[in-house]
Image (tube, rainbow, N blue to C red):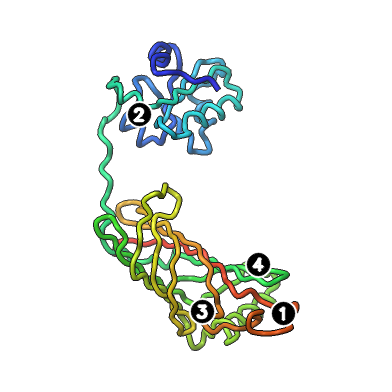
Amino acid sequence: MNTLSLTQVQAQQSSATLIHVLPEEHFACAHLPGATNACVYETVFVSKVAELVPDKNTPIIVYGAGGDSLDASTAAEKLEKAGYAKVSAFMGGIAEWKQNHLPLEGTLAEPAAASPDGRYEIDTETSLVRWTGRNLFNHHHGTLKLSGGQIEIQNGVLQSATFTLDMNSIACEDLADTAFNAMLIRHLRDDDFFAVDRFPTAEFVCTHADPLPSCTPGTPNYTLHGDITLRGVTRPLSFPAVIAAADASHLTGQAQFELDRTQFGSHYGSGRLFAFLGKHVVNDHIHLHIKLHARRP
């Protein structure tokens, strides 16, 4: 991959096609004079460049944010693989251009970020829990719906969160045979597992949340601490989670954790509690993947 310095970009920018490879909202805010836009984060990046630059022998300079961001190098690699013969990457990107007080085009004003502060109600239609249960020889997986909950943000920091699981909604996704599927669901609903007739909901209540300052987008930014109640038994629970604003009116959250079902009275098939189970053993731990969507009321 050929890379260019700031001075080289200035010398060549009039004879090459400059491509700003960040999303269009960043391009609209500020871009190098004469640059065009094709976002490298989109799957149609190469197709978009093909529309902008149909001749693969045209000199192209790609640039992005600069610093440690891989946007420009990734764009150059994609274009080279697509057959473009004269691709160069300006690794300093728009950050180095700004540092040298060089002219820019665009609105030149970053859009103000919407404040996430406020209370959000869990959207039960789009939120979902995925579960996985295992034994020594197999595993089953499925879904649970949420019946309610809320998230509160103050001064940009998560203050509280609750969510309630509808245990009657438990479903299995991997058993295609309807009879076996129905049998498993009955088994999960009875006293061996979740005693749904007596305990139709489970609930998590976050008592406090610790921000994780070293996080990056897409990695957990909080550790949630609180209590989970299942089968009428309440136990402490802590787990990492991603909580982020989707837009001015919506939050989204994701988390994954393991629960030891035996701590809540679900003893069926536990090798810790029964002897000589053989093929009837069922793992004590259940894996849960929580996907939350919440909106301002």
Task: State how far apart marks 3 and 4 are (Cα).
Answer: 18 Å
Question: Which numbered dot is residue 280?
Answer: 1
The residue beneath circle 4 is 174
Decide which of tag 1 and tag 3 comes sooner along the chain. Answer: 3
Within-10-Å neighbours for mark 2: few <14, some 14–19, many 20+: few
Mark closer to the observer (2, 3): 2
- In the image, residue 274 sits, relative to residue 290, either above or below, namely below
Give amino acid for label 4: Asp
Q: Are marks 2 and 1 in contact (CB under 8 Å)?
A: no
Label 4 secondary element: loop
Within-10-Å neighbours for mark 4: few <14, some 14–19, many 20+: few
* Residue pictured at 48% horizontal, 64% vertical: 290
- In the image, residue 49 sits, relative to residue 291, either above or below, namely above
Q: Position of residue 51 (x, y in %)?
A: 50, 26
Decide which of tag 3 and tag 4 comes sooner along the chain. Answer: 3
Give amino acid for label 1: His
The residue beneath circle 3 is 168
* Residue pictured at 43% horizontal, 62% vertical: 292
Give amino acid for label 3: Asn
Decide which of tag 1 and tag 4 comes sooner along the chain. Answer: 4
Task: State how far apart marks 2 and 4 are (Cα).
Answer: 49 Å
Label 3 secondary element: strand
- Residue 32 lies in what quarter of the image? top left
Q: Do the residues labelled 2 and 4 touch (CB within 8 Å)?
A: no
Label 1 secondary element: helix
The residue beneath circle 2 is 95
Give amino acid for label 2: Ala
Q: Where is residue 99 in the image (x, y as percent from the top left)?
A: 30, 25
